[in-house]
Amino acid sequence: MVKSTVISIEPRNKTIHCYSSVDSRRIKHAFTTFEGQFFDGNFSMQFLKALDELGKACPIATNNINIVLPNSAVMIDFFDIPTLNAAATKNNINLTANALYKNFSQLKYYYFPIKQDKITSTYCLSGVKGDILNALKAACLSRKFQIKSITFNAQSILNSAMIFHPKMKTSACIIIDIKDKFTTYVFGINGKAVGYYSLPFGLDILNSAKVVSENTLHKHDVAEKIINEEKSHTARRDEDDEENESDGDNDFMAKLAKELEDGKYSEGSESKVLPDYLQRPAPRTKAELICENFRIFVKWALLLNRHVNKFKANFKPRAVYVNMPNELGFLYNMVNVEKADNGILFAPVCPIREKSAISSDIELYGALNAKQHINKELDFLY
């Protein structure tokens, strides 16, 4: 008996997945590809075709369909508004969002508080175009599929992680889901996804026979420069006297932004120091080589953590939870040796004993029983 089915759309490799729970113990997974771009003029027909193909390859719980949207289909924003009652809050958020987004009336959205006091509340709002939802609903209806929930990739990844780490429901966390050719970062607060980021590479760089330069993978100079410049700034500030210390971080960041915008550092800037990966000794073993390439993922996690630490809600993540094959588990000890410098612990999302069917597709597994983690306030279906 098929208990639940997840239909997921992944534009990064142009695939549509069917992921079904069979008899509570077995998972059946099939996928097919689609042509064109997500939700272009031809996507509805592509989606219908995919449903028919997947129905032949994978059992489907027609009365319990859970759809996972791609992150790229979902907008996330934050609003500071006066602390009011529920009705006044909804009206205030509508007024604020309508002023910011000319097409806000076309969005299906939900919102939730991430920080509240007696005066001001910070809300996170997530929205998706109503046209996308209507097209997917119509396609499922035409195949007599009953949709039970509609979530998105980042929230589903967080749902999976909460199964193994229940404390995420009341804390902040960063999750890294490393696939073969791309990587997803998720930032969660109290069990709700409030941010995501994607990198166009994944396990492929950990399988490389040499140290990978991120310049060859994608344009990332700003990230490397900010890390090195902030370290230089911290060192200089510690050595300066009180007069120099009076210069604020805002002045520093404004100067840095101007130099980055110009495409170079100013003359005499101490940021010309070599990046960290060029200051470390060359890897001597295969494990050291893999760890050196893994530091690219670590760097982006630390950048996100740095941004979060400056965020208004002031939530400090408990840890960075990484989803990758069990055979790479040695990387946690190697990276956590530098915990004092990194300021955060790296840990696995799934215990090693868990089946690969879960860890390899946590963005799908987290939507199988979405109702355990989300209610109507976190569901684009309602």
Image: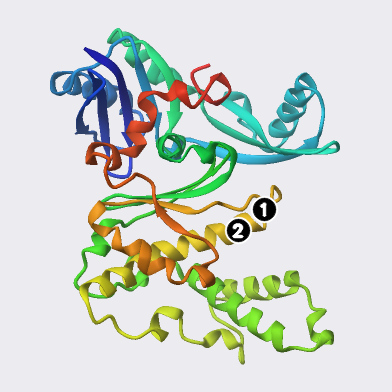
Which residue is labeled 1 in the image?
311
User: At which x and y percent is residue 260?
Assistant: 57, 73
**Closer-to-camera residue (255/24):** 24
Q: Quadrant of residue 209?
A: bottom left
* Callouts 2 and 1 close, C-beta under 8 Å: yes
Residue reaching furthest to the front: 353
Can I make out residue 175 in this image?
Answer: yes
Q: Which numbered marker is on residue 307? A: 2
Is 30 positioned to the left or the right of 179 in the image? left
Residue 284, position as x, y percentages in the image:
24, 82
Count of all numbered marks drawn on residues in the image: 2
> Could you tell me which residue is drawn at 49 percent across and 37 percent down?
166
Residue kind at label 2, given as amino acid type: His
- Percent x, y of residue 295: 38, 68
Residue 218 can be seen in this image: no
Q: Amino acid at mark 1?
A: Phe
Question: Which element carries disc 2, helix, strand or loop?
Answer: helix
Dot 2 surroundings within 10 Å: few (below 14), some, or many (20 or more)?
Answer: few
Residue 328 sits above or below residue 114 on the image: below
Residue 270, disc: none
Distance between the alpha carbons at the discs numbered 2 and 1: 6 Å
